[in-house]
Image (spheres, rainbow, N blue to C red):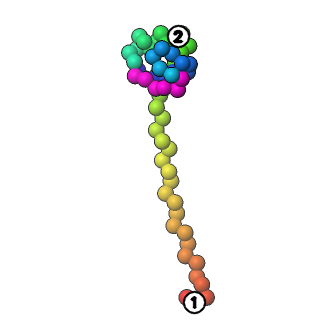
Amino acid sequence: MQIEYIKNAPNGPKGMIDNVTGFEANVLIKSGFAKAYEPTEPKARSKSKPKAATKTEDE
């Protein structure tokens, strides 16, 4: 299970993401050192529309 440390802990500094067993995760979460980490997928960017060609006086 992946966790993110919310406080400095003996296993890692604040903000570190770690893969631990379910038992270890439960202990760290209940003791307030970590929270469950669920990775988020990056948002897909929409394709930009091509710009309309502008006519000049020469065309």
Q: Nearer the viewer, residue 45 or 16?
A: 16
Helix, strand or loop under label 2: helix
- Whether 36 is drawn above or below 51: the answer is above
Helix, strand or loop under label 1: loop
Q: Amino acid at mark 2?
A: Lys
Q: How many marks?
A: 2
- Where is residue 32 shown, x and y percent of the image? 56, 13
- Whether 41 is drawn above or below 23: the answer is below
Q: Which mark is residue 35?
A: none
Q: Which residues are magenta?
A: 14-19
The residue positioned 46% from the left and 32% from the top of the image is 39
- As measured in the structure, the alpha-carbon distance from the residue carrying label 2 to the one carrying label 1 is 73 Å
- Whether 37 is drawn above or below 46: the answer is above
- First along the sequence among labels 2 and 1: 2
Q: Nearer the viewer, residue 13 or 4?
A: 13
What residue is pinned by disc 2? 30
- Where is residue 58 shown, x and y percent of the image? 57, 90
The residue positioned 38% from the left and 15% from the top of the image is 21
Q: Nearer the viewer, residue 30 or 16?
A: 16
Tag 2: Cα neighbours inside 10 Å, few (<14), some, or many (≥20)? few
**What is the quadrant of residue 22 in the picture?**
top left
Circles 2 and 1: CB atoms closer than 8 Å: no
What residue is pinned by disc 1? 58
Q: Is residue 18 located in the magenta-colored stretch of the structure?
A: yes
Q: Is residue 30 located in the magenta-colored stretch of the structure?
A: no
